Image (cartoon, helix red, strand yellow):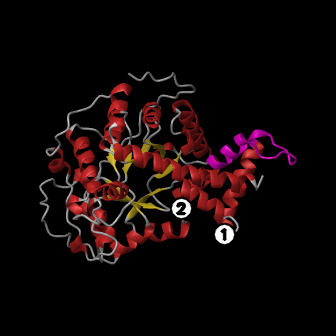
Amino acid sequence: GFVLPSPTLAVHVAPAARPVPKSTRLSASTSASSSSISSASNALEALSELTTLSIDSGDFDVISEYAATGLITDATTNPLFVSQAGTKGGDDARYEALVDEAISYARDTLGLTDGDGANDEAIDLAIDRLAVNLGCEISKIVRGRVSTEVDIRLSYNVDATVDRARRVVRMYEERGVGRDRILIKLAGTWEGIQACDMLEKEGVQCNITLVFSFLQAAAAAQAGAYLISPFPGRILDWNKNQSGKTGYEPSDDPGVVEVKRMYSYFRNYGYDTICMPASWRPSRGADVEGADVDEILALAGVDEMTIPPPLLESLANRPSRDVIHHVAAEREAVKCVDPKFDFTEEEYRKLWEEDRCGRDKLAEGIKSFTDETEKLSSILAAKF
């Protein structure tokens, strides 16, 4: 099996209490054909009563608009949003201030003088600082947690990931944002999941992202991950590409089916890991009116979802009757047909080799976020 390296600077504290997901607080007897929630005036309100909602955005104005409704409690960021914040610097004084502070922080921390150019260490520190600056501002807007991603380029290095995660947490705490307000996002590689195992033992709660297969989800739960972010839309993309099909009924959407499998596994075996799907696609096809939120509606009742602003708007413009409690904890738990896994690294890698969707989409996702990080590196290097 995989032997974890000895952590350095480890601080062992009791993990913060996890909020009980709405899905497990609600009556499991709610039938899949039950009527919509009568008090809600639209689908977004109805969904928020079943599922904790997070906004997938780095735009302060948009986050503020939705946070003000009381329906959105959390926020997720990723390398694209941090890169966009770096790009926006010249257009918006708020973002420019975050970028300038990140550069100054890196220069001061590393003792760089005006004549010194930017080295890799300085750029990496500025990237982390910018991500923290962005997260700190968002934490003032939402009342829940903000997810901040560790440098995606470290996704296959356990020790480097853990070190960078500790640095991000330290910077948040220096800025007065406690670890109970943040989630550290780690890519769902074997190494990222082992880094999660180490960090969770230190009281740093993690969000395992870029999850495209049940295998990743089971390993993340085994590692004690606070939360996972499966991507039903990209699972759908892969299956459509393989099958040649142009669409699926939402309940048969391969991404929806896979997320429900993960959720039922967690609930059946008593894992606390929160299932928070992200990255959505129209199950029935982009040419079908109203299909943009097919996957969201099909997973109504799952623990949490992170949703980008255009789809939040779509939900706000739909009637509450469109929301049906499809995913209820006790009902899903009894549907689990998977054994409880306790992977060694060898066992995991053998199964992973056969997991074509997982392998293809994880590699693609890491490359996409790596490209954004490299773009941001270039932007910041020019500012030193």
Q: Secondary structure at mark 1?
A: loop
Q: Position of residue 295 (x, y in %)?
A: 29, 62
Image quadrant occupied by the N terminus:
top left
Q: Which residue is identified by label 2?
A: 58
**Number of numbered discs:** 2
Q: Secondary structure at mark 2?
A: loop
Along the polypeptide, which appears first: circle 1 or circle 2? Answer: 2
Label 2: how many Cα within 10 Å (few below 14, some 14–19, many 20+): many
Residue kind at label 1, given as amino acid type: Asp
Residue depicted at 24% across the width and 64% down the height = 248
Q: Position of residue 258 (x, y in %)?
A: 27, 50
Residue 141 vs residue 248, the one in the foreground:
248
Residue kind at label 2, given as amino acid type: Gly
The image quadrant that residue 268 belongs to is: top left
The image quadrant that residue 354 belongs to is: top left
Q: Is residue 149 above or below residue 14?
A: below
Outermost residue toward the right in this view: 115
Q: Position of residue 301 (x, y in %)?
A: 25, 58
Residue 17 in sight from this viewpoint: yes
Residue depicted at 58% across the width and 56% down the height = 82
Instruction: Say whether residue 216 is left or right of residue 136.
Output: left
The residue range painted magenta reads: 109-128
Residue 117 on the magenta segment: yes
Q: Which residue is identified by label 1?
A: 92
Q: What distance separates the C-alpha of mark 1 from that of mark 2? A: 13 Å
Residue 308 is marked as none
The reply to whether discs 1 and 2 touch (Cβ–Cβ < 8 Å) is no
